[in-house]
Amino acid sequence: MNAVLIGFGYWGPNIARNLNVSKDFNLYGICDVDEKKLAKAKNLYGDKVKYYTDYKDVIADAAVDMCAVALRNEIGQIVAREVLKAKKHLFMEKPMATKLEDAKLLKRLAEENGVLIHIDHILVYHPIIRKIKEIIDSGELGELIFFESNRANLGPHIKNDMNAMWDLAVHDLAILDYLCNGKHARDVECMGVKKFGDQEVLTYLTIQYSNFIAMLKSSWISPLKERTIIISGTHKMIVFDDLKESEKLMIYDKGVEINKELFSEYGKYEAKVRMGDLYVPNIEREDSLLNSLTHFAECIRENKQSISGPDQGIRVLEILEKADCSLNKNEVKA
């Protein structure tokens, strides 16, 4: 399938590189209005791909099957709509939109034109996240009790067009949605602090589901870089630290057991902590972005919706919009 990358900026070169090595897609072209960026692309790919300065020329090219859009959201939305209207499959960067109504419009356009949308919620395609999903689905973890993510750093950028939650928590919301099979949130609360601009540089997002709770921390003002996820079940517990060179995933055979016999004379029962073994599975390294593209190609061939398709994108946005409302109500100024 012939694919064209629209936007050779921050993340675009990574998409182009993976399209170039993909067994499913042919890197047919690269589009950018900036001639300097196109010159960089030409140095890498030479004459074997086509180069465009206007995205309209891309969508008018009948040879193009799929467009990968890697642009700022306000521009990306316009381009994405035109791609779908031209009946070309769409690979787009996260978030799907900054407004729920825009995301729903993209979904409708895809359905009307018989094409598919894939949002690059890249961590859904991380081999360790896939392993965690396998563990949860097998029942090994037991019933889910809580999900906690910490995504923090000092910067590297303090953005003016979005807050830390929209920049960072999107990753973990997509992971959470994937792990719990798209379960809808029952209640959403968020608190944050603004400093160095008009956007929150630190947010704490709490989500209540019907049978478990999730807490997501997103920070641009931490002296320590963190990329951790902790998941607790009734049988076992999981820690995923993506910054470790090895032993990124640790499975703890730990938990709590209720002993109704103890202290029975007081009419009480005691919770007993169970300490078991630590297991570190060996998981081969994979390129999550290449996995993402491979999954999308499979969806196109089989005409099925992507795991990170518009439905997941909309569910993530529903939480973010509710969180924004909560932030406005609970605003703290440092």
Image: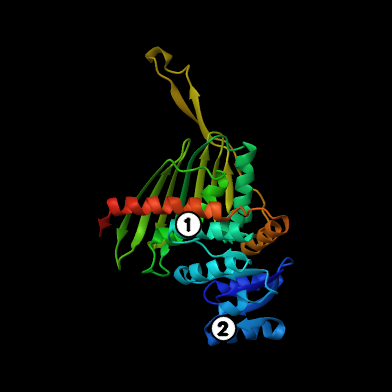
| Vertical side of 121 occupied by 47: above or below | below
Q: Secondary structure at mark 1?
A: helix
Q: Quadrant of residue 302?
A: bottom right
Q: Report the amino acid beneath label 1.
A: Val
Query: Where residue 256 appears, x then y in whole percent?
Result: 50, 31
Q: In the image, 196: left or right of 292? A: left
Query: Where residue 224 appears, x then y in whole percent?
Result: 42, 61
Q: Quadrant of the N terminus?
A: bottom right
Q: Which residue is mark 1?
A: 170
- Which residue is at 59% across, 39% downward? 277
- Mark 2–mark 1 Cα distance, whole angstroms, equals 30 Å
Q: Which residue is mark 2?
A: 53
Q: Report the amino acid beneath label 2.
A: Thr
Reading the chain from its start, which is encountered first: label 2 or label 1?
2
- Counting labels gives 2
- Which residue is at 34% across, 52% downward? 325
Outermost residue toward the front in this view? 112
Specify whether residue 246 is in view: no
Q: Quadrant of residue 82?
A: bottom right
Local crowd size for mark 1, using a 10 Å CA cut-off: few (<14), some (14–19), many (≥20): many
Q: Secondary structure at mark 2?
A: loop
Out of 87 and 168, give the one closest to the viewer: 87
